[in-house]
Amino acid sequence: MSERGFTPRRRLRLSPTGWSRVILTTIAGTVFCVAAALFVDSFNFHNLSDAEIRRAVLVDIALPTGLAAPLLFLLSYKMRELAIAYAELLVVATTDGLTQIPNRVAFTTRAEVFLDRESERPCAGSLLIVDADDFKSINDELGHQRGDLALRMMADVMKDNLRSGDILGRIGGEEFGILLPGADIAEASSAAERMRTAIGDIEFTTMGIAWPLAVSIGGVTFEEWASYDKLFAAADANLYLAKAGGRDQVRVGAFKTRSSGDLPPLPFPRRRRQRDDEFPVTSETPS
């Protein structure tokens, strides 16, 4: 009950996958067919007696009802089945089968929609890239099934630590993308640290032996329109810094565009995909 003492009415949802549309289409189509039959026959009513008019009206009602109603119901039912199949196919096409979160295509599409320069709302937020540290050793030493389990656990933890409007997707083997609409650099850094800590707290064990999980996170915040590719490159560069700095850490920076809209020059080239053990570690100092 509402504060005024009555229950608000529920809106009729005419979803393509629901029964409401099937029933309404059948009824409305049947009524239309009856009305059309009566309208056409009405031009002959002045030549008929009262008994013949009543008989004609009964035929105009019974015949469309008996023929049109079943055919309209069958057509609407088949259209509902097609809508359900399309919806299921869309889910399969846009969802990562392992983690049950949006895949790379779906994540990129949703991010680009948010970044659409034609949108009237302010375009500000943060983009994070999360990459599992030393994940190859998990697959090599524990097997790919345990590696898949670790990815599912990490995805679940990230979902639990995001706001309702945030966008999470799996964009690579052990790499995830996160779009935080409206988040400034402090909020993005806090969210990234929260997820890094939560993933580190996952109890991932194999045959009673605890196996630590860790991630490196690179991110970029933006306060004006920028293309997804440029934001991704900037976040990816910060991920490189997090990896090169020892892994299991967060690096988030602000994205600033030139007047030409180009990405500011970075002090290093865009990274290629590397294993964690490929980053050199040395204590030598330059001469």
Image (cartoon, helix red, strand yellow):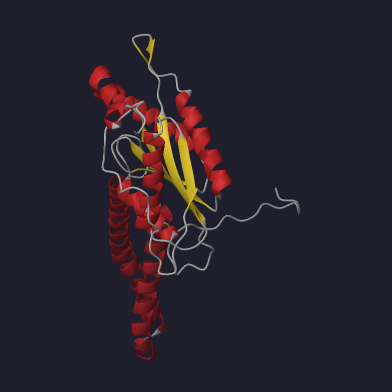
Residue displayed at 35% across by 34% down: 286
- Of residue 259 and residue 78, the one placed in the foreground of this image is 259
Quadrant in the picture for residue 47: bottom left
Residue 280 image position (x, y, % from top left): 30, 30
Q: Quarter of the image holding residue 22?
A: bottom left
| Observer able to see residue 27 | yes
Q: Decide if residue 77 is on the left or right side of residue 217.
A: left
x then y, percent, for residue 190 = 56, 39
Residue 16 can be seen in this image: no
Tell me if 196 is positioned left or right of 16 in this view.
Answer: right
Q: Residue at x 41, y 44 (%)?
A: 238
Q: Residue furthest front?
A: 287
Residue lying at the far top of the rendered structure:
208
Q: Position of residue 85 (x, y in %)?
A: 28, 50
Position of residue 199 measured from the top left corner of the image (x, y, whole percent)? 45, 28
Residue 157 as seen in the image, left or right of residue 176 = right
Position of 273 relative to 220 (above/below): above
Q: Nearer the viewer, residue 282 or 110?
A: 282
